Amino acid sequence: MSDSQKSTVGDSQRPLVDLQCGRHTYPDGTVGIHDVAFSVSPDEVVALVGGNGAGKSTLLEHLNATLVPDEGELVVDGTEITGDNESLARREVGFVFQDPDTQLVAPTVIDDVAFGLQNDGVPPEEARRRARAALERVDASHLEGRVPHYLSGGEKRLVGLAGVLALDPSVVVLDEPLAGLDPERSQLVADRIRQIRELVSVVLSTHDLGFAAEIADRVCVMADGDIVGSGTPREVFYDDTLLERANLVPPRVVRIGRAVGLDSTARPVTEADLVTLLDDETETLADESREATH
Amino acid sequence: MSDSQKSTVGDSQRPLVDLQCGRHTYPDGTVGIHDVAFSVSPDEVVALVGGNGAGKSTLLEHLNATLVPDEGELVVDGTEITGDNESLARREVGFVFQDPDTQLVAPTVIDDVAFGLQNDGVPPEEARRRARAALERVDASHLEGRVPHYLSGGEKRLVGLAGVLALDPSVVVLDEPLAGLDPERSQLVADRIRQIRELVSVVLSTHDLGFAAEIADRVCVMADGDIVGSGTPREVFYDDTLLERANLVPPRVVRIGRAVGLDSTARPVTEADLVTLLDDETETLADESREATH
Amino acid sequence: MTTLSNHVPDPRLVTAVAEHGDGPLHRVNPWTKVGTVGALVLAVTVFDRLVLLAGLYVAVLVVYGSAGLPYRRLLGWYTLPLLFVVSVAGPLAFLEPGTPVWGAVSTPLGELSVTWAGLVLFAELGCRSLTVVTFALAASMTTRYTHVAYVLGRLLPRPIDQIALLTYRFTFVVLETLEDLVTAALARGANLSEFWANRRLYARILGTTMLSAIERSERLVKSMEARGYDGDITLYGDVPRPPALELAVVVGSYVLVVGYAAVAVYEVGL
Amino acid sequence: MAHIHLGEGSFPLWALVLWTTLGVALVSAVVYRIRKGGIETHQVALAGIGAAASFAVFQLNIPVWGGIHMNLTGLVGVLAGPLLGALIALVVNIFSAALGHGAVGLLGANTLVNATEAVVAYYAFKTLLRMDWDVFPAGASAATLGLSAGAVLMGVIIVVSGVNGSALPRGDLAVAVAGLVGLNLGVAVIEGVLTGFVVQFLASVRPDLVGVTDRAARGESTGVTA
Ligand SMILES: Nc1ncnc2c1ncn2[C@@H]1O[C@H](COP(=O)(O)OP(=O)(O)OP(=O)(O)O)[C@@H](O)[C@H]1O
Ligand SMILES: Nc1ncnc2c1ncn2[C@@H]1O[C@H](COP(=O)(O)OP(=O)(O)OP(=O)(O)O)[C@@H](O)[C@H]1O
Ligand SMILES: [Mg+2]
Ligand SMILES: [Mg+2]
């Protein structure tokens, strides 16, 4: 499925999450992000890209009030989040951390998936039922009784995702969902993300620009703690000045597309785009040549 | 630079490292690799690919006797490694670990790079000199006085590489050299690897098959603790049965090449291959069409 | 791995045996094992005769073996517990009043000799310690991860149960960090077999282990709070009550131990 | 050679009951204090992983006197503070006992000893820093002091309890135990020096963890800033 053609969802709709962050300073004085405005609309997949230390994780952790801006505000679903209603942000915005080993705290998978529900005061039987349903949603029901320690990286990631989905959030945030996964497991996790996007909005960060191009409706480019540009994958990944500013190299499809002269017209960003275009082109040329011969 | 066209270096030459491993069992009973024979010739770059848990790291750690096979032997530079001459293996085969945080132990970068030399009994002044030279070789001289803990992921990786190069090994082993790096830093590390391959043989593991295709002379595919196939990138990445057996998805260039019908003839594996081929093809077709018209 | 000790049981090995094995002891209810440990502790504390203690020890050894567990490893693991016995009972073997076993050695401190009473004391303490050590290991190696977690969660008061559950979960992760650090140092030719010459390296390895543990705990806080942690990791896993037969055996053993103590040791009149 | 723990069945029943009671009292007091302040996630997380680290470090064989093993209790005290330090001591002892190291029946006694080490090391370290000592000597001295306090307490526990089945008069027992305590003091010095180096290393990388920057002054009751 290629989602990149879908345009950014209407600004008329109220955003699910709206962050106005004046700056975030870490305890040791490092400024994680500067003046950043970021919002998530219903039904969209947003990818954050940028170099190491650009501030992606810092921004993401603001979205569910894990981090709080030095000044600025976070509005979730129309409600401003203050110290008192952080739990609203935590419930509406699920967070899957980069290191799945820190995410899984309970001794078994089912306990872990139910962990958030239990904290939310859901009675045990109900929590169990909903945890099972969440595991099913990511096709990981068979892992229910397993011990997290013995899971593979990809399985851990799926369980982390289920733990977040169990809480029925309206936005799911994933920090580097593919890190350390082999191609097959990456595909699996990517497929699950595509699957859940039917139900929730997704915000993710990634170093794999090809993946960002395949999955995102909107790409935000970060550099030095700022969002330096954003747009559809097509807009962003053909914008050389922007990518250079963020020290990024265009994804492979774009490089190939450009090298064969498709950048001025069709601007492919996904593999499917590129293949279709190449097929078309050779066909056109072949047709021409055939016609001419006849 | 595309190295993939270079054929595997002559079997007539004595391999630098030759591992015959009858099996490696971890203390908890997990079998990391089964019966594996692996050798490294002078001047080649070998990439190990395979799913999570396929045994790549386990195999790599045998090459410098960090792990020892249950039965089998390791021959380095013609000398069989036993308990007594492990230091030979450690000197000849440098190892850059996947997690750079566990590799760097000294309070400053220069001390860290000199660490191995000092263990080798090189006098401090000499060790420092050689450490500096090694840092220069990876273009990281400016990091000399920094504290390793505060370096970025890419910088840490370069320092780890320098620490290994300082020992003048004949083979450098890199476990997942690009893990967690942004595109620019990946490029930097990849460039440094290309640079050092003039001097040493390189063995690396990676999940990025595109990177393996770009950099390796020979690709070994691992699955379930065995090497299930190997060959040039071109041979391996167009071998569907092999890739499927290892649960791998062909790299993007191959998928595109195949989708546009280049798989039966030219079989591009690197971006440069593909672009040249596509250019040629459109040109040929365009020429044909032009010729025909005239 | 040469530097991680083979005198200390590797928790990864222990849990792996527990997870994958399927011996008779694997099928015994975890609560029964907990109860038995208690009975054994009581027994080795109140039993006052070497024969009894030795008999108990042999019985436990038989149980250990019949559970399909490796005797050979046990010898390595005995090193430290035996050392504790030696360090307390060693001197006592000389000092204990009684008949010397062989001729006295004269030392600057006076005449010293091992007495029969001292020797018996030594043997008794050895049996006492190893009986429980052996059974504790057998229980650990035959109780599944989830059951251990459940039992911990049940036995300990808040917040200690929470701490213990996280410890159980993360011991393996920290252990891998430590092992990676040692491996990386060795791979660069470090010589870890000399402590003083390498004390700084040891300090850095241990320091980095601690540091990565603490930084992990900082990330853990975030991930737990992101899911609204309120001091409760709840466990759904369930350990059923022991079957009647097992219950009877446990209760019976307590009755035996207490009965023996009352009659033979404390001479309670009937 | 190792940091000595008390072995199973060393003491008569009454002593087992006594030390268990005291251990329970200590842990209850700590739990009460922590619960009163509200259980904070960072305390649970730090204590949980701190205990895991202490337990994992025990697996490392330090090649002195044929090999010693340590839990770095002093370091744990310095890093986690007295309250969490005591709980970590308990949890580590529980897991150790499950692996046949230490004793189930003497959990109380062993926890008293280890908690003392952590608590003394913590206060000694704070005091020495306040006296403007450098990090290394302060860390090394504090840990040595803490571990020595633990060693002495253990000696006292043995002498008070009397060894199970021994007819030796307390006076002679004290002589025998003095040798044991002496041995433990030797290990304490080594572990102390090592702890000093570790603290120095941590101070160079994350000064806030060992409380040598101003911003780490908060969290006095637990000594953590996690
Ligand atoms: N806990 C922290 N304490 C101090 N500084 C921090 C902390 N976490 C991040 N930083 C700093 O904040 C900046 C932004 O970091 P962040 O982790 O958000 O980057 P990122 O874009 O997620 O990078 P990566 O791609 O490597 O994950 C960096 O300069 C980083 O060093
Ligand atoms: N220290 C260890 N103890 C026990 N089993 C281990 C250990 N290290 C690896 N294994 C197991 O050995 C097998 C091979 O692991 P290895 O790390 O070599 O795979 P890999 O190919 O490097 O995977 P990845 O791509 O995830 O790094 C796996 O089943 C793994 O679980
Ligand atoms: Mg990040
Ligand atoms: Mg690996």
Image (spheres, coloured by chain):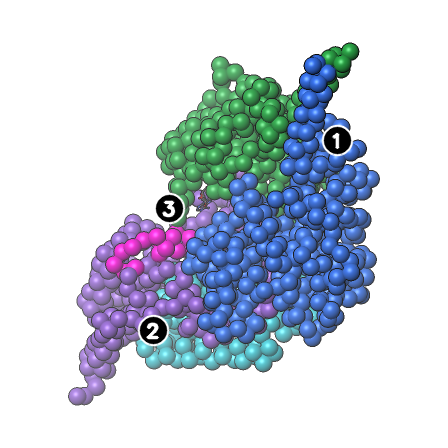
Chain colours: A blue, B green, C purple, D cyan
Label 1 sits on residue: A262
x, y percentage for residue A14?
Answer: 75, 63
Asked whether C24 falls inside the magenta stretch, the response is yes
Q: Is mark 3 within 8 Å of ligand 2?
A: yes
Q: Residues within 10 Å of mark 1 (few under 14, many from 20)?
A: some
x, y percentage for residue D216?
Answer: 70, 66
Q: Name the image quarter holding residue C235.
A: bottom left
x, y percentage for residue B294?
Answer: 78, 11
Q: Is residue D135 visible?
A: no
In this rendering, would B15 be left or right of D205?
left
Secondary element at tag 1: loop
In this rendering, would C188 be left or right of B30?
right
Discs 2 and 1 share one subunit: no
Q: Residues within 10 Å of mark 2 (few under 14, many from 20)?
A: many
**Parent chain of label 3:** B
Q: Which residues are magenta?
A: C11-26
Going by the numbered disc 3, the residue's amino acid type is Gly
Label 3 sits on residue: B29
**Parent chain of label 2:** D
Going by the numbered disc 2, the residue's amino acid type is Phe
Residues at marks 3 and 1 touching, judged by CB atoms closer than 8 Å: no
Identify which residue, C257 or D46, lies in the foreground: D46
Q: Residues within 10 Å of mark 3 (few under 14, many from 20)?
A: few
Q: Main secondary structure of the magenta part?
A: helix
Q: CA distance from mark 2 to mark 3?
A: 38 Å
Depicted D5 relative to depicted C210: above or below: below
Residues at marks 2 and 1 touching, judged by CB atoms closer than 8 Å: no
Q: Name the disc covering residue D11, or none.
A: 2
x, y percentage for residue D221?
Answer: 63, 74
